[in-house]
Every structure is written in C-alpha cells, then in structure tokens.
Amino acid sequence: MAVQTLPDVHLVEDETQTLLHWAASVMASDDTYFGRGQRLAKRLGAHSRRDGLTEFGFWTPELTADVIQSERTLELEIFTPLSPLDFRQPQQTIPFQRDRVPMAQQGEFLWAVVAGVQAGNREQAGSFYWLRYVDADHRIHIIRDPLAYSVPYGVFAPAEVYDMRGLQRQRADLNYFRRHAAPKGIPDAEIPRVAPPTNILQIHVKTASPEGTLEGLTHVFQRISDKLAAGELLTPGEAVYTGYDAVQLLPVEPTIEYRREDTNIDHAFFAIVPEDPDDPTANGTPEQATTAVEPDATSTHIHITLRKPNTQNWGYDVPILASSATNPAVLGSLRPHEVVDFIATLHNFSAGPIHLIYDLVYGHSDNQGLELLTQQFFKGPNMYGQDLNHQLPQVRAILLEMQRRKIDTGADGIRVDGGQDFRFFNPLSGRVEQDDAYLLAMSDVVQNIFGYRRLMFTIFEDGRPWPEPGWEEKSTYRDLIEMKPGSFQWGPLIFAHNTPTLEGFWDRKWRRVCEVIFQGDHWITGCGNHDTVRRGNQVDRDAPINWNLGKTLPTVLHRAYNNPATLLWVHGFSPGLPMDFLNASVGAPWGFFRNTDDRYGVKVVSEEVGFLDWQIEPEMYADVDAFPQLKALGFTDYEHLRNFAYALRDAMIETDYDLGAVAEICQHCLGENTNGSCEVPALGDLNEPSLPRFLATLDVPKLKAFAMAFMEDGHDMCNVSRYYDTLDPHQSHFGVQLRQFRLQRPWLRENLTGRDRFNRISDDERTIFYGYRSEPTPTDDTSDEVVLITHMGGAPMTVNPGDWLQLDMADWRVALLTPGLNLQRDLKNLRSFELRDGEGVLLERRIGGSDGPVA
C-alpha cells in the first residue's frame, strides 16, 4: 500500500490572531451572554476554509489558565492517514501522521488556524482531531469536539475534518431548495416555514433495509421511485414504504458505545497501537493511560486500528457529544455524503417530494456523556442518565448550534423528544418549571442550505405533567401547540401506555378518541410506533387478550398495531397527522435492543424477555439463520430459551439486579451438585439434562455473553427485509389505497365541525365507531363527503349506517374496504351489513362534478 506525502501541519500565527481578535470583539460586544455564545458557537469545531486552511475552536471551561499556559501540555492533536482508508472494511490498521499544534486562549475558548490539514470528502478520509492535555500528575486528558460534522469511528474517537461546503455544493436536490426556501437577501421575518405533511412513515434505519444503513434505505426508495416512474407494479415489500409524503427517522445521532472498565483496545473503533504491546497500561485510548510519554517531535508516525462501528441501538441512548453528526453505525460508507444522498432521493422522488424529519434527543444524556463532555453540560442525574444544563448560556448556544448543523444536512422537519424533560429550578418562583423558551427556540432554528433558508416543520413529544402519578389522564398534550401555533404534538393515542392487544381497549379510550376527533388537528395520530409496540411486549400474558385479533400472541400484537379498522379510522376519517411505524406495517418484530452494555446488559435483557412471547413464534426461532448466537450457546430449543429468560428475570428481581448473586443462584439451582432446593423456583424448574450445559457453570462473564447474544440476535430478527416475502399483498395494497385516499383529501386533517358527526355503539360485547364528515371549504365546484364504519373490538355486529346517520344510502358508494370484505358478497346492501372485529368500510359521496372510480 503506497504511503502518501503529506504537507507540513503547522499553526498559522497571523490567521490565528485574526480569529482571536474576532472572538475578543464578540466577547466585548453589548450582546447578551447567550447572544455572544451563539455567535461563538458557530465557529466552534473544525471548519475547512476556501483558502485551504482549517479553523479549530473549543470551549474549555474546565481548564484553568495555568493549564492552558503550561508549555507543551495542551495541544491540538491531529491524525492524518498516510494510506487510503477502506471505509467498508470491518477492521484495518493504518499508518497515521500525528501532529501536535498549540492553540491560543481567549477566555474560556481555545482557537487555532492550521495549515496542512486534510479535509474529508466522499472518497477520502480527512484528518482526525481532538484536544489533548497532560495534567500535573502526567495523566493524559482528551477533550473532544461536541460540534463535529463527522465521527466515522464513534464518539470516543477523534472527529474528522470534513469539506461541508463541497458536500452542499454537490448535493442532488439543490433545485428542491431553490423552489421551497428563501433565497439570500430575504429578511429573517420572511423566512418560510416548511408546511406540514399529510402522513408520516416512522423508520428505524438499522432494521429498515437489508443493509441496515441509510444507503440501504436510499436503494429502497430509489428503486421504488424508478418503478413508479416507469409505471411498474410494486411488490408488497415495496408498497409498505409508499403513499407517505414524510419519513421520520428514529434518532440518528451518535449513540453510546460498548465500553469496559478494564480494557478497550480489543474492540474500540479507534485504537492507537502501542509501541510496546506488552505494556500493561496500553489501552488504545489515551486518557486511560497511566502516564504520558512525550515525544520530542511535534510530528510522529503511528499505527491506528480502525474498526467499523457496529453499534445497535434504537437511537435514544445518546451521549450528546457530536449530535451534530450522524451515527456512523447507520452509514454504510461512513461518509456524511450518505445522509445527503438519502435526503436528496426523498426530495427528488418521482411521485412527489418526501419530507425528512429528524427525531432530536436533547432532553437528556446517557451517563456515558459524563466521560465525553465537560461537566458544565450537566445538571445532575435523572431516570435516563443526566439532565442537560440548558440554562447555562454557552451550553444552550452549543446545543442549538448542534441542531442547526444537523438540520443543515437537508431535513424538512424535527420531532423534539421528551419535551416534558426540559425543566429547571427557577429561583425567582421557587418552583421547577418547563423550559418552554428553549423548546420554542428549537422550532425557530433556521436552516441554511447553500444560502437557501427555511424554518422546520416541528413536532413536540410532550406528556407534561409527566412524571406525576396519573399523568396519562392528566396531560392535555396541547401545551406546545398553544404556545407555538402551527406546530404539532404527539396526541394521547400514540403514547407508550396504549395497549390495543387487550379486550375493550378502544372503548376504554373513548374520551381520548373524542379529543382526537374534535381537537386533534395538530396532533400526531396513529397506534403503532417504536414506543407502543415495545410496550406491547410487556403486557402480562394472563391479561384479558383480544383473541379476535389472532391465535397466538405475536399474531395478536401485529394485528393490534396494524389493525385495518384502526388504520381506516386514523387515515380515512380522523383529524391530525397520521404516523405509521414500518416494523408494525410489515409485521416485523420490534424491541428495545442495544449491544452497548457491559454493566447493564443483563438487566436490560431481563426486562425485555416478553419479546419472546409477543414477537417470536417457535417456528421463527427454528429457522436456520435465526438466533445464531444463542443457539451457539446451546439454546437450540425455543422453550428452553424462553423458560431460562423468565427465570433469569425472576432471579434479577430477587437479587435486586446483583449479577454476582444471580450467577451463584444459577450455579446452585442448575449445577450438577444441586440438592433440589432453589431460591428462585423458576430456576429450579429448569434443572433438566437437555438444558445447555454452560448454565451449570454460569458466572458473570457468561451472563453478559448471554445478554449480548440475546440483544444482537433479537435485533437481527427485527429487520423488515426478513419478512418481505410473507407480507399479505391485500393488506399492503389496502394500506397504499388508504394513504392515497388521505393525500387526495387534505381537509381530513381539520377538526370535525358543523354538521359532522362521530359516535360509537358500545356494550359488553363490542365497540363500533361510525361517523360522517364533509369537506368544510371546497376548492372547486365539488364537495367531498365521507362516512366511516369500523368494528374496533368484540363480537360481530350488523351495522345500519343510514339509520344511525340519517342518510339515504342510495347516494353513497364504497371508497375503501378493509381486507377480507368483499363488495359483491358482503356489501350488496349499504343500508345493513355485518362487520367483524378489525373490519371497516369507508363510503364517499361527491356533490357536484363527476364521480371518480369506485376503489
């Protein structure tokens, strides 16, 4: 492999002084602390300039002036590859040139303008960088860039310098922004906000395509776009992606990573190869070295082992650092270009532009963030990890700048996760209050794509007064809608506490159903999403299950969260903005899986064992390519795995999650010398010769190995591509027709008014929803009217929509039927017909103009 010749990397003194003077002028201005912080934040991080130089800026409030001024203890450390990187290689060891460059202090900030730094692009890696200093005890400390544009080897590795200007200049959707954004020179007050879409497809990137990457999704959408343009029929596995004018990704910020307390050199994504492999302090991570060895030269050659990130996570376990970048585990190429390619494919979709919505997590940080960010970012612990210190002006400015850099990849909207978590103690009032000002500021961050500016379409998830007892019933889910007209909020029927697998669910939710109907025009509506489906796994198997939905728990769950009757009500009749979850639409399993845990992995698995009951059929487990790691441990039988998983859960609860105690109990109950007594009865019941023998010598490392195998095998089972061939074409076709029905009738998003009607027939046996809607403000000489009748649960019933709604059914025709109903067989007479659980009908009447074809 040829080694390239590199330019000299050095500080450019005069340009650095110019940058320092600018920073000093900002600090001396009469702007507010926050205003100054915002201006400074825009130049923090690494910026490749047109003149070939690179600007670096760090906010370092934790460093004292003495440390900063100490000779040769604080430097910008730059790693430039001497050989080309293969970004698709699982592992490679590459020679690097390491340069250390001094930085200049200005208050709490460090600045430098450096020559010879390589900027990354689609084909080549840029130089990697972080700030490094040595304390008085000769320990190495690393300060990473929270505002990085690219972190191809994860949050613990140095960030990559990237040519963002070149990326924006080359994007394939610039014409889209020319049409939909404000050009240069337009006053800020006239910057347009992205209009809301009509419906949303929620996607988890790692399970949404065979590749599990954004480029995999690009292939899916580009293939569908090409087939639609050519007039070709779609397969059922392609149809489930279509009929939406927006896609919302579960968070794609960098997530936490697997870390051990002893050594990480054997699995770290970026590991500096020690000069002495036998050195016991060698860990591959500079800050874990016990002593610093200072070379005389400012430039040296080293070798670094690079491993392609393979992190699995649903996206919400974030350390906040580099949230401006994209999680490298969802990038097949590890290049930021991959994100823009996907967004451009959506914007240039042949059937019309599709919006891209980011799910942003800025309400909390995982505890791993404490290892990566300065303490000023945090207020203290919470149930998710750490509360972020939004009230500190510079932290507030940096977090908003993270968001700005993120949406500048080309997003059209944002979903703000956990709005109720943005709280602070107000000393003036003496109360804990919501930081609504910050939430509204998130909605007003201006996107700038090559000079074209827009404000984002905004969704808030906010369940205040969570976590008060009874918050599910107390919350209005309207606080931010009322504060920010035009914004949207998650409605009450899309939150995690909903369980449509249970008998009578929709009858019990009638109050919330009526709220959706009469005030839900700015709510996100629907039933299946990442949170509700995961919570479905936790329903007690002995609860009153609605067995009309299926014969097994998995068929009940998949039908409940992709119920044709519910979909007909949500998409075909209800106000608001419907959102479907891809895994629910496909009938693919879903759960909370992450391979990032050393300390808590067994605890997480013990809480997710319901996944086996609610998502996995024994026949699925028996597939040759299913659960390979667990089978390699000896769990070749589904029932053995299930029984042990539940026994492990009981043992974890019994010992208060003490892994050592759990291992001892397992050895006592499952070992060869057991005396028949067992502290956990469920474990004692397992002691049979056919069980995997490794259970008899179970220790903490084996418990962790089991947990990792469960997590990774479970995650792989959630990939939707495994189930394309099993999709019901009638169900897929119905979904496309239903989504098109709503796209053609945007007025359905508005609340019911005037002579519109909605009601239910409900008794101990069944629940029926029915209603009538009319287009409030016709756009031409025609007016649409719609009638809905859906069976939401229970025994069959003969329905009489004409009598219930006082309509002459001779004027009406069928617009849509749920799969299984037949127009000629079941609906010869629209005045009276039978519906079963999960079935429904949409009728339509058009006043004026000519009728369209019957669906």
Image (spheres, grey):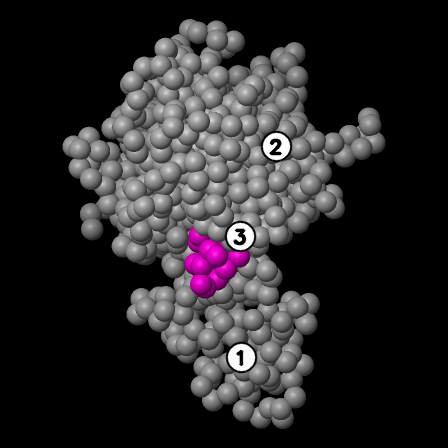
Looking at the rendered structure, the secondary structure element under dot 3 is strand
The residue that mark 3 highlights is 794
Q: Nearer the viewer, residue 751 or 281?
A: 751
First of labels 3, 1 by sequence position: 1
State the image quarter where residue 471 is shown.
top right
**Which numbered mark, 3 or 2, is in the foreground of this view?**
3
Circle 1 crowding by C-alpha within 10 Å: few under 14, some 14–19, many from 20: many
| Amino acid found under the numbered disc labelled 2 | Glu
First of labels 3, 2 by sequence position: 2
User: Is residue 85 shown above or below 606?
Assistant: above
The CA distance from mark 3 to mark 2 is 23 Å
782 relative position to 542: left or right? left
**Which numbered mark, 2 or 1, is in the foreground of this view?**
2
The CA distance from mark 2 to mark 1 is 53 Å
Q: Residue at x 44, y 66 (%)?
A: 709
Q: Nearer the viewer, residue 835 or 469?
A: 835
Looking at the rendered structure, the secondary structure element under dot 2 is helix
Circle 3 crowding by C-alpha within 10 Å: few under 14, some 14–19, many from 20: many
The answer to whether marks 2 and 1 mark residues whose Cβ atoms lie closer than 8 Å is no
| Amino acid found under the numbered disc labelled 1 | Leu
Verify whether residue 557 appears in magenta.
yes
The residue that mark 1 highlights is 698
Which residues are the magenta region?
546-560
State the image quarter where residue 761 is shown.
top right
Looking at the rendered structure, the secondary structure element under dot 1 is loop
Q: Nearer the viewer, residue 219 or 782?
A: 782
Q: Residue at x 44, y 7 (%)?
A: 186
Verify whether residue 620 appears in magenta.
no
The answer to whether marks 3 and 1 mark residues whose Cβ atoms lie closer than 8 Å is no
